[in-house]
Amino acid sequence: MRKRVVLGVTAGLFAIAAGLSGMAQDIGVTKTKIKIGTWGPTSGPFQQFGRVMIGIEALVNKVNREGGINGRQIELLKRDDGYDPARTKLVVKELVERQGVFGLVGGVGTANGAAILEDVRLNQIPWVSPATGSTLFSQIKDGKPRTPSVFATYTNYVIESTLLLRYAVNTLKFDKIAVAYVNNSFGKEGLGGVKAEIAELKGKANLVGEVSHEQTESNLALQALKLKDSGAEALVLYTAGDAMLSLLREMAKIGYKPQVLASSVVAGAILQAGPATQANGAIIASYIPIPTAALADGKNGDPRADAAFAELLKLAPDAVKADPLSTIAGWAFAEPLIEGLRRAGPNLTRDSFVKAMEGITNWKGSLFNSISFSPTDRQGNNSVFLVKGVYAPRPGFVALSGWVSFNSER
Amino acid sequence: MTFEQAIRLLIIGVEIGSIYALVALSVVLLYRTSRVLNFGQGELALLACFLTFTLTSRMGVPLWLSFLAGLAASAVAAGAFYFFLMRRAKAQDPMGLLILTLGFSLFANGGLSLLFGVDNKQLPGFVDVIETWTIGGFSISKNSVLVAVAGLILMVALYLFVQKSKIGLAMRAVSQNPEVAKALGIPVNLVLVSSWAVAAILGSAAALLLAPAISLNPSIMLDPLNKGFAAAVVGGMTSLPGAVLGGYLLGIIEAYVGNFVPAFKLALAFILVILVLVFRPHGLLGEKETRRA
C-alpha cells in the first residue's frame, strides 16, 4: 500500500513537471492571463497624444471578447506619464517591477521611450510598436539589433521624409526644396532623411532652404520670411503643433505658396491652419490607411480602418470623432503584438515571443501595409501612402497614391 | 539685407512687440502696486480666451461681446484671487506671494485643461488672420495692423487711466508708499484689487490678439509670458513707458537677430535681461528703487 502511494505521488509529480514544461510561461503570463503595459499622457497639455491608448484598448477588448489568445485574456495596464520622460521612467518601472507585465505596447513620445530604452534592453522586456517614428528604437549595431526585444512598426521619420522627397522630386518634378523642422529628434531625423535623399538623387534636387525652431516657439513669422526668400518650390515640414500652424499662416500672410509635404505626425492637426493656407493641398505621409470618417468626400475609406473605427467609437466616441487618426494608430500599433502572441503559441515566454516576432515576414494582417521583422531587422514597416489635405466638400483627405515603400526604385 | 526684407522684419517685430508690450505692462502695473510677479497671469489670459471662444464659437454670442465678457471674467478672477488669497496669505513676503501665484498658475492651468480640453481651438479674430493690405508696395496683414493698433490704443488708455483717473492716482500713491496711502484714507485694498483686474485685462487682451493667429490651447501663453517678463525687466519694473519700450525693443531686436542667427532667438530675451541687470539694474526707463520703510 505504502509503495503504491509513493509510486502514485512520484508519478503525479512527474506529470505536473511534464505539464509545466509543456506549458512554459514567463513573467506576466498565467494560464488565463497575459499582462501588457502601455502609457501615454492623459493629463496635462499634451493629453491628446494619449489617445493612442484608446486604439490599443479597443483592439485588446475585441481580442478578449473573441476568446483571447491561446485561451488567455489580455490584461492591459494603462498609465499616465503626462508626456514627461521622468514620469515615463517611473510608470514603466511600476508596470515592470510591481505589476510584472509580460511586455509593453505603444508608449507615446521619443524622449519618453528613450528614457526607458536602457531598462528595456537590460531586462529584455518585449516592447512592440513604440508610438514614435524615431530610428532610436530600431537601431542596428554590428549587424544585430541594439535592443532585440523592441519591434518598431511606425514608419520612421528618416524613411518617411525620404519618401516625401522622392514624391516631390520624381512625381511632382520640383527641384528647389526647403525643410522646416523643429529642433528635436523628430525634426532632425526628418531633415536628415531629406538631406540624405537629396545627396542620393545627385543633382536632381537642391536643398535651397532650411529653417528650424525651438519646441517652445509659437510664432514662426521669421521662418516664413526666410523660406519665401529661399525660393523653394516644395517645403517638407518636420514641425508640429502651434508652430506648424503659425508657419502655414505666416506663409499665407506674405503670399508664399510652395507645395507642402508633411510628416504623418501632423496629419491630425494640419487642416486647422485653414483653407487659405498651404495646408490646403498639402501632401501628407500616412502609415495607416484613412477611414471614411477622415476623408473629405466621406466615401470609400479603407474597409479595415472603418472596421477599427467602428470598434473605437464604442469605447470613446468623443475622442475618436475628435481625432480618428491618432486613435486608429493605437489600434494598428497593437495588431503586431497580438499576432506575435498568437504565433508564440501556448508556451508563451519572452524568448518564444521574440522568436515569433522575428518570424513575421510580409504579414499583411494589420492596418500597416506589410510587417516584416528578422533576427537582424527591427524596423517592421517601411511604407507610407500619400494623401492630400483638402477643405471641400469638408475638411479631410483624399488619397494620392497607393502604398509606397522605402525599398522601391528611386 | 534688402530694404524690403528690413521692412518686413520691422513689421514682424512690431506685431510681436505689441504683444510683449501688453504683457510687460500688466507685469509692471502689478509690480508697481503690489511688488508681486504674477505667474498666474498667463492662466488669467487663457480664461479670457477660452470664455471668448466658448461664447462666440459654441453659443453664437457676437465676437465683440464675447471678447468683452472674456476680459471681464479675467478681471474678476484676478481681483478675486488677490482679495481672497493673496491678501489673506500668511506669508506676505515677496517669495511667499510669488510661490502662491505659481501654485495658482499650475492649478488654474490644470483646471482650464480639464474644463476646455487641450486640443487646439480656433479662436475667431476681428479680421482674417491671413488677409493683407498692400501699402506702398508692401503687403501688411490685417491682423498685424490690428494687433499693433489695438496694442497702442490699450497702452494709451492705460496711460490715461493711471495718469488722469482718481483710481489711477491712488494706484500711483499706493505704489509709492502703501502705508502713507492708507493713512491718507486711500482704500488700498480697492486699489490693489483694481490693479490686479487691470493687469489681467492687459494680459488677456494680449492673449486675445495673439490666439487667432496661432491656435488656442492651454500652453499658448508660455512664450509671450516669458518674453513679457523679460521686456518688463529690460524696460524697468517700475516704469509703464519702460514696459512699452522693452516690449517693442525686444520684438524688433528678436526679429532682426532671429533672422540672421535663428538659434539665438530664444536666448536673446534673457541675454538682454542679463545685460540690463548687470549694467542698468533698474531697467532702461525705471527708477532706482529705494527700499520701503
Image (cartoon, coloured by chain):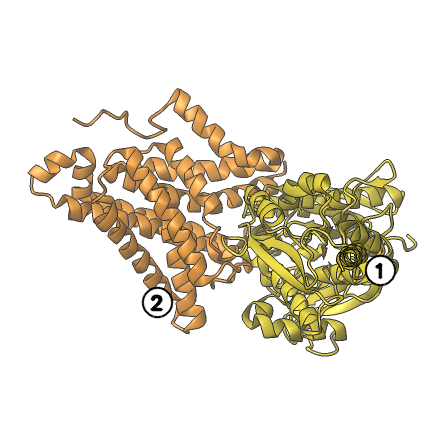
Within 10 Å of disc 1 (Cα), the crowding (few <14, some 14-19, many 20+) is many
Percent x, y for residue A235? 72, 51
Viewer-side residue, B191 vs A344:
A344
Q: Which mark is in front, 1 or 2?
A: 1
Q: Secondary structure at mark 1?
A: strand
In the image, the chain rendered in yellow is A
Which residue in the structure is indicated by mark 1? Answer: A404
Quadrant for the N terminus of chain B in the image:
top right
Q: Residue at x 63, y 64 (%)?
A: A57
- The reply to whether discs 1 and 2 touch (Cβ–Cβ < 8 Å) is no
Left or right placement of residue A73 versus residue B245 in this view: right
The image quadrant that residue A269 belongs to is bottom right
Q: Does label 2 lie on the same chain as label 1? A: no
| Residue indicated by mark 2 | B65
Q: Residue furthest right?
A: A409
Q: Position of residue B97 (x, y in %)?
A: 29, 39
Taking the spot 15% from the left edge, 43% from the top edge, the residue there is: B188
Q: Residue at x 38, y 50 (%)?
A: B107
Which mark identifies residue B110?
Answer: none
User: Which chain did the image draw in orange?
Assistant: B
